[in-house]
Amino acid sequence: MASHSDTLVVFFGATAGANGGKLGSDERELILLVWQIVDLHENKVGELQRTLVQPDSVDLSEQCKEETGLTAEELCKAEPLESVLHQFHQSVSAELKSLGRSSYTLCVDGPLLIRQVLHPEASKKNLVLPECFYTFVDLKKEFHKCCPNAGPVKDLTLTSMLDYVCIPVAVEQEAGLREVKNMVLLILHLLVEPYNHKFSTFETINYKFESGACSKTETVDSETVIRARGLPWQSSDQDIARFFKGLNIAKGGVALCLNAQGRRNGEALVRFINSEHRDMALDRHKHHMGNRYIEVYKATGEEFLKIAGGTSNEVAQFLSKENQVIIRMRGLPFTASPQDVLGFLGPDSPVTDGMEGLLFVKYPDGRPTGDAFVLFACEEYAQNALKKHKQILGKRYIELFRSTAAEVQQVLNRYMSTPLISTLPPPPGPMLSVPVLATQPFITTGSMRDCIRLRGLPYTAAIEDILEFMGEHTIDIKPHGVHMVLNQQGRPSGDAFIQMKSADRAFMVAQKCHKKMMKDRYVEVFQCSTEEMSFVLMGGTLNRSGLSPPPCKLPCLSPPTYAAFPANPAMLPTEAALYQPPLLATPRTPQAPTHNPAHTLAYYSPQLYMNMSYTTYYPSPPVSPSTVSYFAAPPGSVAAAVAAQSAPAMLPPQPGALVRMQGLPYNAGVKDILSFFQGYQYAPEDYSSLVGVSDPGRSLIQPKEWLCL
């Protein structure tokens, strides 16, 4: 068999829109193909062939009509692209056979026709291109090798190249024929003295995108990275690679971006093999993926590594298996085992290497997040698994969708670096100090309706959005009075509570802001009491039929909604008497206020609260972070203090102190906890009466499960 350098097929095409240097940038279809064979050994040429292509839309631009001279009537009589490509392959094969050759390589004037027009259009029309369209010779680059002084490759044109070697330009009336004749003249001239050029450098197009892992220590050239925006949320890395079909993406070079809640936000960072491919990708700005147009912008290597880079050996080992389809499972029961997942997927979708093909995502302390990634050996198995989307495992429905290696890295990085309670990123500005004790830092559960409830917030809404929504009424918000409610998965629920300075102010806000727009959604605003707010923050529900208690039998271990000590600072024991040094941790100082000191947002140590399956609030609990009764101890310091110090030294004056225990076994009961503190006095039965819990709240608390040391 002859090598690819034996025969070249000079290839030219035009679209219904822009041509020349902007070919393919406007996403218009092919309407014209012209080709001619050149025998490189005998310097012979074949017959010049020209054919029209019928596009789906025969709306021709003025530039196209002027340059090609074609009309809509002519194109309506032509064959569609699939038939034309079949005719092309048959014609070239027959001519090669007559010349005694068996293989050929396409030769084009720049890569745009192949990379920016033919491959993207064939991908959209679900056409399988012959193998010959995955390898080609770029005449401009070959000429630059022979004549490096002719100028940079990007500035070369057919006319300038012919002028440089002193060849007269062919004059031809019909567009396409003229360009092919000039290309053939240039090729024949390069084959002889003084150049004797050998066409040996071939451009290639990847058949498919290769997934893979990326290390944070890897160097990524910023000239090879773009950001794509507006992607459908269900897009996979293969879908994005298909959008950029014709351009070569680096291995593992597609990184889907996730929002603060761990869901895809419609953006992706894509890394190409070189800057030339990146520049062609930028020309696909506002091209379509289905019915949506995609925005394409420049990005940096640092941004790509932040999303796709990983350091976990577990992830690297999981992704080390080549050519695997990755499926993400979300919403798994926390008690789900690998056997449960394999049984859920069933025999029609076997997981690669059994349990080794499963990767459960966990928090830093080992608690499950409900997410897992699964490897499948082929597309068929993955499709069978996706059919189980929203089917039930245990008592929960499971979401399944395609994923990527970069998403695996990103999800693992996010969870392993996430504190146990969500916090806002610290805004720029000077740090402000807060006094250790503040007057009235607690929520007193009562019936006074000095609070408002916001319902229907956008899930992306932040504190700043709420303050902007309230406008001039923000001056009436109590300090640390904004509480955003998270659901049992730790994601925003769309609800928020705001404590106002008086019931009149709350009523006024509810009247003026009800059904006012925030972003693209209207928000309902209701007046409510602190008691109603506390119930919702503890996990209960607030509806037309009244209050519903939290759906749990255990007491709420997130921040309690009652005052652990009297509000009057004079009644409080000294700080030294309340806490010994091992139990006192240094709190973070709050950030500078953005609107008013009353709106200062509090930030907390990650060890302050644990995101359990209870409703929590964000960013500030009802108690000031500077209140000594809510300082968090470092992990293990409570137990260490109990073991190291005598009971009298640890006992503060009544009414006592609360101790939080972390790292308990999931099957630990009350008796196990009491046995652990054997020899120390815990709270009496009427402890709840000492701390001033309301009657409905007292019914939710089992006194002996709160320990007073």
Image (spheres, helix red, strand yellow):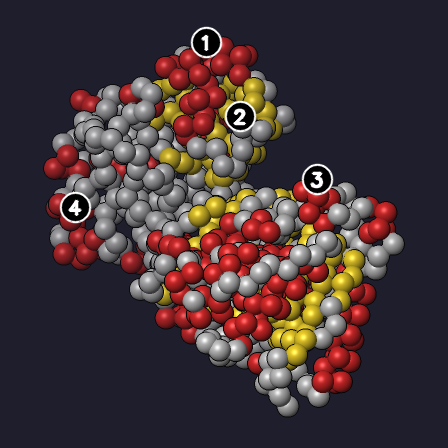
Q: Which mark is residue 492?
A: none
> Horizontal and vertical percent for residue 445?
41, 25
Visible residue check, residue 370: no
The Cα–Cα distance between marks 1 and 3, rounded to whole angstroms, is 67 Å
Q: Is residue 78 above or below residue 473?
A: below
**Quarter-wise, where is residue 618 in the image?**
top left
Q: Tell me which residue sits at (29%, 21%) in the image.
A: 597
Q: Which of labels 4 and 1 is toward the front?
A: 1
Amino acid identity at mark 1: Asp
Q: CA distance from mark 2 to mark 4?
A: 50 Å
Which residue is denoted by mark 1 in the rendering?
504
The local crowd at label 4, few if under 14, some if 14 to 19, many if 20 or more residues have their Cα within 10 Å, is some
Residue at image mark 3:
62
Q: Can you name the residue that lies furthest to the bottom here? A: 1
The residue indicated by pointer 2 is 518
Callout in the foreground (4, 3): 3
Q: Residues within 10 Å of mark 3 (few under 14, many from 20)?
A: few
Query: Which residue is at 14% across, 44% downward?
Result: 580
**Front position among marks 1 and 3:** 3
The residue singled out by tag 4 in the image is: 650
**Mark 2 falls on what kind of element?**
strand
**Between disc 2 and disc 1, whose residue precedes?**
1
Q: For the N terminus, which image quadrant?
A: bottom right
Point out the tag, 1 or 3, that comes first from the N-terminus: 3
Query: Comparing marks 2 and 4, which lies closer to the viewer?
Result: 2
